[in-house]
Every structure is written in structure tokens, then in C-alpha cells.
Amino acid sequence: MPTSFAGSFQEYKTTSPGARFTDWLAARAEPYWSQATDHAFTQAIGNGSMPEDAYARYLIEDYTFITDLVSTLAYLVAKAPAMSSKTRLAGFLALLTSEENDYFLRSFEALGVAPQTYQAAAQGPVTRAFADLLLSASANGSYEEGLTCLLCAEWCYLTWGRREAQKPRPDAFYLAEWIDLHAVPGFQDFVGWIRTEMDRLGPALPEGDQERLAGHFRHMSALEVAFFDFAWTGATPDLAEEFPRI
Ligand SMILES: Cc1ncc(CO)c(N)n1
């Protein structure tokens, strides 16, 4: 497992020449970044060894996450400086509210989760912490702060999605399609675009702002781990105890 890097982006570039700003964000988020992208829950999606109750618990919680992610995207569309960036973000917003929403509804039906259940589901503490960070960074922070949170969430899913896509697809459509949604070229392009955008904007910021971005990315990575932990075990994590250094 890669070790955590604690220094500034300037220092990182001297130890890893040619390193991208987004490589530094991921390095600063270790060990959580690797724990999130390699989580046992993500391996079970691709192995077809996912228990139905764990996946239903995950999807109910994730649907509430996606609802806040859509609001996050709306703030970012508003904050994006140019038509080209607004177009990218609006395209992803449209995907979440059409194809991906449809995926959730069909999956809930297949798993026997009633609309009353997923529509009325209260967010657990991990998703509430996600919502706090995503919504406050994108609504009250800079464009770069919101984009950094989005990058963590989507790059994490691209990383495990592409890895699991190397395996034969599991039989359950809701597992197979969840892999495909996060491994298709269109999603890869979108995450690649966010990285390029942050690789351009991040290095131009003062060091204090860069530190704040690294803090957001690290916090988001820890929440991704906690989110998978909860889905996998059904136990509500104590965030302060599990992640004392976020
Ligand atoms: C918790 C979480 N993080 C990231 C994604 C990717 O959008 C998701 N669906 N859920």
C-alpha cells in the first residue's frame, strides 16, 4: 500500500518529477485513497460474491448520496468559469438524473426494495458527512474546492470500476451495470477531464488553498472507505474513532 505523503505540492514535485497536481492529492490521501479504491466491497461487486442484503443496503444509502451529488453538480455548473466546463458538468448531471437514476429504480425493483423505503430513507452518519462536505465545498467554497470533492468520488469509482471490468461480468444485472457505468469510455473521459482541469487550476493556487484542497480530497477518501465499510458490514462506523486524522 502506498505510504502517505505529507508535504506540499512543490515538495512532491521534487521527489516525483513530472507529477500531476491530482497525483499529489491522491498521495496526500493515503492510506485512505488505496483503502477506498481496493475495498473488499468493490471486489465483491466484480466477483459476483456480493450478498443481496449488503447490496440493497448500499444502494439505498447511495441513492441519498446521489441526490446530494446532483445538487453538488448544479452548484458546480453555476461556478464553472466557461461554457466548455459548464457543458462537461451539465452532461454528467444529466447522466445522473437519467440513465443512472433509471439504474437505481430497476435495481431497487429487482432487489425487492419498495419505493416508500428508498424515497423515505434517512441518511446515515457517513452520507450526512459526505453531504456536509460536498455541498458546503461546492456551495460555499471555490470552484476548485467543489471540483476536488467531485474528483475524489468519481476517480475512486473509475479506479475500482476499471479493475472489476477486467473480470467476466457477474450474472446480476445490477452488479454488471454498476461496473459498466463506472468503466465505460464516457466516464473515463469525464474523470480525465476533471483531472486535467484540476492539474491546470491547482498549481496556480497559493499554498494555503492547495492545502485546503488536499484536506478535502483526504476527507472524501476516508468517507468513501467508511461508506463501503457500512455497506459491507451493516455496522455504523464511528467516524472520529476510525479516522482520527482527517
Ligand atoms: C459514495 C459514492 N461515491 C462515489 C460515487 C460515484 O458517483 C457513488 N455513486 N457513491
Image (cartoon, rainbow, N blue to C red):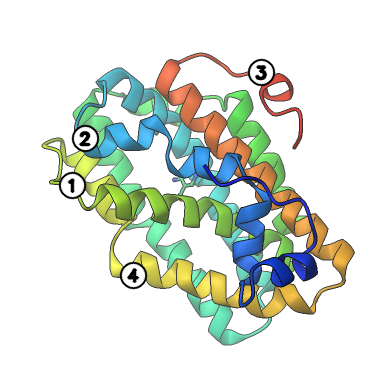
| Amino acid type of the residue that numbered disc 2 sits on in the rendered structure | Asn
> CB under 8 Å between callouts 3 and 4?
no
Q: Compare residues 208 and 19 and report the one nearer the observer.
A: 19
Q: Residue furthest front?
A: 15
Disc 2: which residue: 47
**Is residue 9 placed above or below 158 in the rendered structure?**
below
| Amino acid type of the residue that numbered disc 3 sits on in the rendered structure | Asp
Q: In the drawing, does residue 209 fall left or right of residue 144?
A: right
SS at badge 2: helix
| Amino acid type of the residue that numbered disc 4 sits on in the rendered structure | Gly
Q: Earlier in the sequence, mark 3 or mark 4?
A: 4
**Where the C terminus falls, by quadrant?**
top right
| Amino acid type of the residue that numbered disc 1 sits on in the rendered structure | Lys
Q: Which mark is residue 167?
A: 1
Q: Compare residues 155 and 11 and report the one nearer the observer.
A: 11
Nearest to the eye among marks 3 and 4: give it: 3
Q: Earlier in the sequence, mark 1 or mark 4?
A: 1
Quadrant of residue 117 in the image? top left
Disc 4: which residue: 186
